[in-house]
Amino acid sequence: MRNLDVCRKIYSRMKLSEQDDASVSLAALRNALHFTLTAAQVSRDPDYLWFEPYSGLGTGDSHSPEDFDWLVDYLDHVYSDDQEVAFDIIFLLGPMKVRFSAAKQQQFIKSLIACMGNDMPVYLRYAALRAAHIVREAIASIDAIDAKLRDMVLTKFSPAILTTVCPRPGTTLANDPHDFFHDERDLCYLELIFALARDPSWHAHLIGDHHIDRCISMIARFSKSYTLHPFYLSGILLQIAPEQLSVAPLDGVTEQQWWDMMRRAWRYADSQAVIDNIHCFEFLPVLVEGTKRHMQIASEYDLEELVSYLDDVLRALERRLSEQREREGVIVVVKEFRTIASDMLEKSVNSEGVISP
């Protein structure tokens, strides 16, 4: 925290300086910011954005969010000329959880959009994506934000997110060492889109800006994986699904792809990432209904696997029941679904014939 106080004083001095003196202050500020991140063992290697657990700097009660508004101003000033400094600032305001005032929210998002551009270095684009991921709940609550900011978020922020994981046709990701798919980055992206998809206000933009196309392109890679990707893919597409007659790309998702995605979604539905996240928890009844719609083609092995996953989920939910009684309704829904899956399995074992739910 002391390092940031020093940086703020240098920034204030730079703003008041003549051009020659300002360049000296600018160099000092650049070094001081980098030292702050180096002391926190932060790397610009993009992979560290997804794997490293970073704790906040502990801004303390003696500092208000307004004390860090200068970081947002500095980011707006510097991102086009010095991407390394821009990375340092975004990392402080994102993963390091240094908070600024609500009055700077629009300016910060505008800078994030610019830093997500496909002409920016990969470490900066990914840092911007990670920062957006961290504030995804605030961004997802689109109806609660200022009308001007709402318009910018819907029309500019949404397409900018896509450029961090999928370049526009005819372009390549600048200096991007990764393949078209990158598991950890894509999980961060899916968690962000999952949050946005909860609000119907986002649906037309997620479709029009080709996020749904991107998600569908991930199905073949992740629908059978033992990761959280199938959970979030299912969450995004099922929340869009009530409108699927008007979403042409969803027509191309095969019944087998839906089923593979649904059953794998249950694999990690007992994880803390799901059970302890209220929005993921509230999605479970939707996942139940979605799985019911696509389980007609389930094999005996598939059903055995699904019942086992549901048992794990129920155990996790019941452990939390004593702490949060509102979970009881979801437990009832999952238990009823577990009975349906178990009955289908028993019928399959007994008849060795076609399974019908």
Image: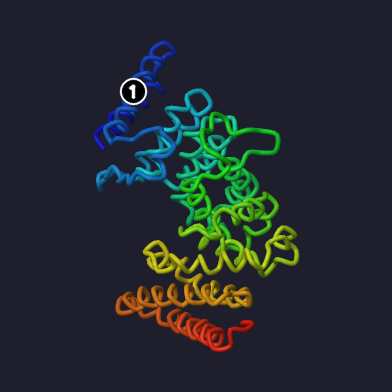
What kind of element bears circle 1?
helix
Q: Is residue 292 visible to the viewer in this orientation of the structure?
A: yes
Look at the image and tell me in which quarter the N terminus lies: top left
Task: Work out whether 241 lies above or below 324.
Answer: above
Residue 192 x %, y %: 51, 53
- Front in this rendered view, residue 201 or 342: 342
Query: What is the image's colouring?
Result: rainbow
Residue 329 x %, y %: 45, 82
- Front in this rendered view, residue 307 or 30: 307
The residue positioned 51% from the left and 74% from the top of the image is: 301
Residue 134 x %, y %: 44, 50
Task: Work out whether 144 lies above or below 46.
Answer: below
Look at the image and tell me in which quarter the C terminus lies: bottom right
Count the marks: how many? 1
Residue 292 x %, y %: 59, 78
Q: Is residue 141 visible to the viewer in this orientation of the structure?
A: no
Residue extending farthest to the front is 352
Determine whether, in the image, residue 313 is placed left or right of residue 172: left
Assess disc 1: are there few (<14), some (14-19) or many (≥20) residues with their C-alpha within 10 Å of its C-alpha: few
The residue positioned 57% from the left and 30% from the top of the image is: 174
Residue extending farthest to the top is 20
Q: Quadrant of residue 351?
A: bottom right
Amino acid at the residue labelled 1:
Asn
The residue positioned 67% from the left and 50% from the top of the image is: 210
- Front in this rendered view, residue 157 or 169: 169
- Front in this rendered view, residue 72 or 254: 254
The residue positioned 30% from the left and 28% from the top of the image is: 35
Determine whether, in the image, residue 66 is placed left or right of residue 75: left
Task: Work out whether 27 lies above or below 217.
Answer: above
Residue placed under numbered mark 1 in the picture: 31
Determine whether, in the image, residue 249 is placed left or right of residue 141: right
